[in-house]
């Protein structure tokens, strides 16, 4: 069974940091591009960051550029999202998803495996 499990969410004050992890089981994550998405209350899900299978290509939504960093450790079958300088508007459920064809897109239909999400709340 192909699974992604996110962890690392929680409550943090504005300006704080969190590191999310996305761990794969049942398949080799290193063959997949991986993206982080988020869905804030009352809003549509949006792409936040994406990394290619090799890790050579990364991109970020404008809203998180310079604050978030995506990385991967294929030996650990895990992708990370380091989130710094967090703002209240970053509050959302964060999902990771895997694309087997490295398309470098946030088109949700390209992503064949999804995690269950982890909640990030930025509040004082």
Image (cartoon, grey):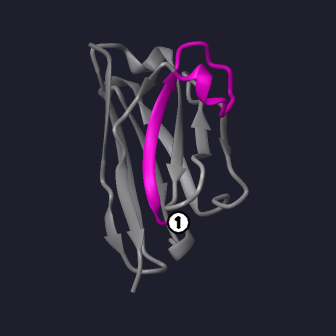
Based on the displayed image, in which of its 4 quarters is residue 104 positioned?
Answer: top right
Residue 97 placed where, x, y %? 47, 31
Against 52, is 27 above or below? above
Q: Is residue 26 left or right of residue 47?
A: left
Based on the displayed image, in which of its 4 quarters is residue 62 positioned?
Answer: bottom right
Residue at left offset 48%, top offset 60%: 83
Residue placed furthest toward the right: 62
- Residue 87 appears in view: no
Quarter of the picture holding the N terminus: top left
Which residue does the numbered mark 1 point to in the structure image?
90
Q: Is residue 115 left or right of residue 53?
A: left
Q: Is residue 123 left or right of residue 108?
A: left
Residue at left offset 62%, top offset 19%: 102
Residue 6 placed where, x, y %? 33, 42
Residue at left offset 30%, top offset 28%: 76
The local secondary structure at tag 1 comes to: helix
Query: Observer-nearest residue: 89 or 50?
Result: 89
- Residue 59 appears in view: yes
Quarter of the picture holding the C terminus: bottom left
First to last magenta residue range:
91-111
| Residue 110 within the segment the image draws in magenta | yes
| Residue 99 within the segment the image draws in magenta | yes
Neighbor class of circle 1 (other Cα within 10 Å; few <14, some 14-19, many 20+) is many
Query: Observer-nearest residue: 55 or 37?
Result: 37
Residue 105 placed where, x, y %? 69, 29
Residue placed furthest toward the bottom: 124
Query: Observer-nearest residue: 74 or 121?
Result: 121
Against 11, is 92 above or below? above
């Amino acid at each position: 069974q192909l699974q992604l499990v996110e962890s690392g969410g929680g409550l943090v004050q504005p300006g704080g940091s969190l590191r999310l992890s996305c761990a794969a089981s049942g398949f080799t994550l290193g063959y997949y591009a991986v993206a982080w998405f988020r869905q804030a209350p009352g809003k549509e899900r949006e792409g936040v960051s994406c990394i290619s299978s090799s890790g050579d290509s990364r991109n970020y939504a404008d809203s998180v550029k310079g604050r978030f960093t995506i990385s991967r450790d294929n030996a650990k079958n895990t992708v990370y999202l380091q989130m710094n300088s967090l703002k209240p508007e970053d509050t959302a459920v964060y999902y990771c998803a895997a694309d087997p064809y490295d398309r470098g897109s946030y088109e949700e239909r390209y992503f064949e495996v999804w995690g269950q999400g982890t909640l990030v709340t930025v509040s004082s």
